[in-house]
């Protein structure tokens, strides 16, 4: 064992550069994996991230607005409870309606100060917080409410509420837009939140006011018990509603299943790519020391001692790199600009943090140890006789194709670079290294596919089941087609499709689904049909993937459901992309629904806009054209989640690029070392040092070009299948995946090739400067 330690120590002193690279490569991979884990946690737990950033309240208690609510003195006993860590409020509240540009939404006005509260603090995403002494009364809107109203900082909204002297209407200026960990606003499912100053609430003079207080608990699992104690202390008669953190989490997290599953697949793939990259670096270093191994065996080292020596070295490199990478990520990661820094800063408060910080480095070290064990076993089999071994592959003569290319006066640098990359000895190892480099590039291409798919939710919503950009509802359903004609006359409207929506019971009444009637047989709704065809006859319908999975049926079958007590039987002639209700939607025409309910009136109109129309301008023009009180709502964007998916995808691409760089440097270093005798032979027959360096750069560029072409092709095919498979699993349905523009893929290939050429410049210069006398040992 003492001899093994002395050899390890001597080897480290002799190959300091290689040892440093091995440690830094392991550290870089660990950093990449930990950043990827932090980003995944940041992306797939949007509510937890928002809750931690805002020091959110686990429980919100809403007092009655009948003058018998609670006041600050009532909260003192709550703050003293063992389960309660902090109390937010109480805040005076009033229920009102906000309206702008024909869009109307319910809101709970919450009076707060000029500084956001420490607990349950709204996080500004645009604009600024409320300021005292402003020329006009201000309001800060919750983000989903602001998006519904198309309200941005600096614009005005009209607030209507019942005052002491009847309904009053006032104008408020939007100061900012904020996020909160409370349940989000959904049209028809409750009110949104707007924060105003107490003086503004007094000037609005509401007839009644309520109170709202938040409780941040020490242990989230004590929520039910804490609610029981709070209700007992305050009195059940004084409490109108209690909102728990589980409701908000379910509300936010439900929209991110597709993104969460895609990011989880990325995490596993990044771990695989990192393990492959480090394993390749270990095998390359062991192969490069074949001469030293033969000398050790010649002086008496046994195969077991050689194996132990390599295991000690490379496991030590892996442990040192893992420790260095983990420490660097935890201490310096939070200072990284952009979402990576935000993710690392919040990571310690996210679930699964400790398991990831410990598990990722341990898993990486074990994978490196496994790769090292295989390489060390091969090292133990190296023969000790120098004449019987070859530290480098033997050179072979130029192929007939190469000689013909030289005869055609092609550049010798290009011909020899091609031979060095693809036809020289050791090409099996070179092809394996090319495949390893292609793996992270394939994952980067998959990320670009996901990026492009998310982008089409905004650029081409009709392709993902969002043909209608606006929905118009009236207080009194119309009796004729006058409203439809009036809406179609609005500038920018291509079609106004009448519709109705019902909740139906599935066979056996064990679940519910959404039944929609859209358009007529003469003027159908433009469904996004990806399988089968659109409905155009009696009792025909299209369904989302979620409904097909729920009922266990396929396109072409008949389904039966119960709608308001009456049976409805429909023939499924197609599958459509359905972003709403988890895809558990079946859509037919209003004519089909009227066959069973002759008096059915349209409950809303879906407006399909022209390509160049502005939804906000159209929404503002609808009320005047309709001639009645209408409510205009924008269509929700299913990709506009709390996890900022496109920003996280960009960060994941950077992580994968780092892994690809480690593999690229290993590939170039191995290639130069394995072909050093060929390069020296070329020097001996008359090639200039500049040509020698150009051969090295050309070989690296051609190798990376092949890896880039292979990676982008495989990544495009894999990404298309992966996105469609995950979309089908979430109920949205396959058929939404979209490949990046060919120019983007071409730019990726060119960027990778250029990076390979630039990375090969330093070893090319060193090789070109070598003299034959300095490399005699390598020519034996």
Image (cartoon, helix red, strand yellow):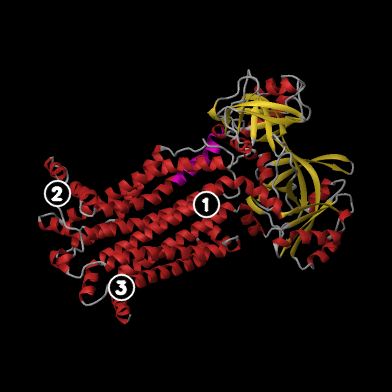
- Residue bearing the label numbered 3: 304
Residue 452 at least partly seen: yes
Mark toward the viewer: 3 or 2: 3
Q: Quadrant of residue 509?
A: top right
Disc 2 is placed on an element classified as loop
Dot placed on the residue nearer the N-terminal end, 1 or 2: 1
Farthest-out residue, front: 508
**Which circle marks residue 751 in the picture?**
none
* 452 drawn magenta: yes
Q: Label 3: how many residues lie within 10 Å, few (<14), some (14-19) or many (20+)?
A: few
Q: Nearer the viewer, residue 380 or 647?
A: 380
Q: Nearer the viewer, residue 367 or 73?
A: 367
Q: Position of residue 42 (x, y in %)?
A: 56, 55
- Where are the magenta residues, as a range? 446-461
Q: Quadrant of residue 669?
A: bottom left
Q: Position of residue 646 (x, y in %)?
A: 52, 47
Disc 3 is placed on an element classified as helix
Q: CA distance from mark 1 to mark 2?
A: 48 Å
Tags 1 and 2 touching, CB below 8 Å: no
The residue at the point 42 percent across, 40 percent down is 717
Q: Is residue 216 left or right of residue 657?
A: right
Dot placed on the residue nearer the N-terminal end, 3 or 2: 3
Up the image or down, 505 lies above or below 210; here it is above
Q: Quadrant of residue 393?
A: bottom left
* 144 drawn magenta: no
Residue 176 at least partly seen: no
Q: Position of residue 436 (x, y in %)?
A: 35, 53
Q: Is residue 115 left or right of residue 40?
A: right
Name the quadrant of the N terminus.
bottom left
**Which circle marks residue 264 in the picture?**
1
């Amino acid at each position: 064992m003492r001899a093994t330690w002395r050899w390890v120590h001597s080897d480290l002193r002799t190959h300091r550069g290689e040892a440093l690279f091995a440690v830094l490569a392991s550290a870089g991979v660990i950093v990449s994996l930990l950043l990827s884990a932090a980003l995944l946690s940041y992306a797939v737990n949007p509510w937890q991230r928002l809750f931690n950033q805002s020091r959110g309240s686990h429980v919100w208690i809403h007092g009655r607005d009948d003058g018998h609510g609670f006041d600050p003195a009532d909260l003192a006993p709550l703050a003293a409870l063992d389960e309660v860590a902090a109390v937010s409020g109480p805040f005076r509240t009033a229920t009102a309606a906000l309206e702008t540009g024909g869009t109307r939404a319910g809101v709970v006005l919450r009076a707060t100060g000029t500084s956001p509260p420490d607990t349950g603090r709204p996080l500004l995403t645009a604009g600024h917080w409320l300021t005292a002494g402003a020329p006009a009364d201000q309001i800060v809107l919750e983000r989903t409410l602001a998006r519904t109203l198309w309200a941005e900082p600096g614009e005005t909204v009209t607030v209507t509420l019942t005052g002491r002297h009847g309904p009053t209407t006032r104008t408020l200026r939007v100061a900012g837009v904020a996020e909160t960990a409370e349940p989000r606003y959904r049209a028809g499912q409750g009110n949104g939140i707007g924060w105003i100053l107490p003086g503004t609430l007094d000037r609005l003079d509401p007839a009644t006011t309520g109170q709202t207080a938040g409780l941040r608990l020490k242990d989230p699992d004590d929520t039910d018990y804490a609610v029981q104690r709070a209700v007992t202390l305050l009195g059940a008669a004084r409490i109108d509603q209690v909102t728990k953190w589980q409701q908000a989490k379910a509300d936010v997290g439900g929209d991110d299943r597709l993104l969460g599953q895609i990011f989880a697949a990325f995490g596993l793939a990044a771990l695989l790519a990192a393990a492959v990259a480090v394993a390749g670096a270990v095998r390359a270093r062991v192969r490069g020391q074949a001469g030293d191994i033969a000398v050790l065996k010649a002086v008496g080292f046994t195969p077991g001692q050689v194996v132990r020596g390599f295991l000690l070295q490379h496991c030590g490199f892996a442990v040192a790199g893992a420790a260095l990478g983990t420490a660097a990520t935890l201490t310096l990661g939070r200072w990284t600009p952009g979402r990576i820094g935000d993710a690392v800063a919040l990571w310690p408060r996210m679930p699964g943090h400790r398991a990831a910080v410990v598990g990722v480095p341990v898993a990486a070290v074990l994978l490196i140890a496994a790769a090292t064990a295989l390489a060390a076993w091969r090292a133990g089999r190296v023969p000790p006789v120098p004449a019987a071994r070859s530290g480098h592959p033997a050179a072979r003569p130029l192929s007939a194709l190469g000689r013909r290319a030289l005869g055609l006066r092609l550049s010798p640098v290009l011909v020899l670079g091609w031979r060095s990359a693809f036809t020289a000895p050791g090409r099996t190892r070179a092809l394996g290294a090319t495949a390893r480099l292609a793996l992270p590039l394939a994952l980067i291409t998959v990320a670009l596919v996901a990026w492009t798919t998310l982008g089409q939710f905004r650029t081409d919503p009709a392709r993902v089941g969002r043909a209608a950009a606006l929905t118009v509802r009236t207080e009194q359903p119309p009796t004729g087609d006058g409203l439809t004609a009036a809406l179609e006359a609005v500038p920018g409207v291509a079609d106004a499709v009448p519709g109705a929506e019902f909740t139906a019971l599935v066979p056996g009444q064990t679940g519910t689904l959404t039944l929609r009637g859209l358009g007529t047989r003469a003027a159908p709704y433009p469904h996004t049909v990806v399988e089968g065809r659109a409905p155009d006859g009696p009792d025909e319908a299209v369904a989302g993937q979620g409904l097909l999975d729920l009922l266990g049926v396929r396109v072409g079958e008949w389904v039966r459901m119960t709608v308001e007590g009456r049976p409805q039987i429909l023939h499924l002639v197609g599958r459509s992309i359905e972003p709403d209700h988890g895809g558990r939607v079946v859509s037919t025409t209003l004519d089909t629904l009227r066959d069973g309910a002759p008096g059915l009136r349209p409950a809303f109109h879906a407006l399909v806009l022209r390509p160049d129309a502005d939804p906000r301008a159209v929404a503002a023009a609808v009320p005047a054209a309709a001639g009645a009180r209408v409510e205009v709502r924008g269509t929700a964007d299913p990709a506009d989640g709390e996890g900022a998916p496109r920003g996280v995808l960009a960060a994941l691409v950077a992580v994968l690029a780092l892994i690809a760089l480690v593999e690229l440097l290993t590939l170039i270093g191995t290639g130069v070392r394995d072909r050093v005798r060929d390069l020296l032979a070329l020097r001996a027959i008359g090639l200039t040092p500049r040509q020698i360096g150009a051969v090295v750069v050309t070989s690296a560029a051609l190798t990376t070009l092949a890896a880039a072409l292979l990676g982008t092709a495989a990544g495009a095919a894999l990404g298309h299948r992966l996105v469609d498979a995950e979309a089908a699993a979430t109920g949205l349905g396959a058929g939404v995946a979209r490949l990046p523009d060919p120019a983007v893929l071409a730019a990726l290939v060119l960027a990778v090739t250029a990076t390979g050429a630039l990375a090969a410049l330093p070893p090319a210069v060193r090789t070109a400067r070598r003299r034959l006398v300095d490399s005699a040992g390598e020519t034996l």
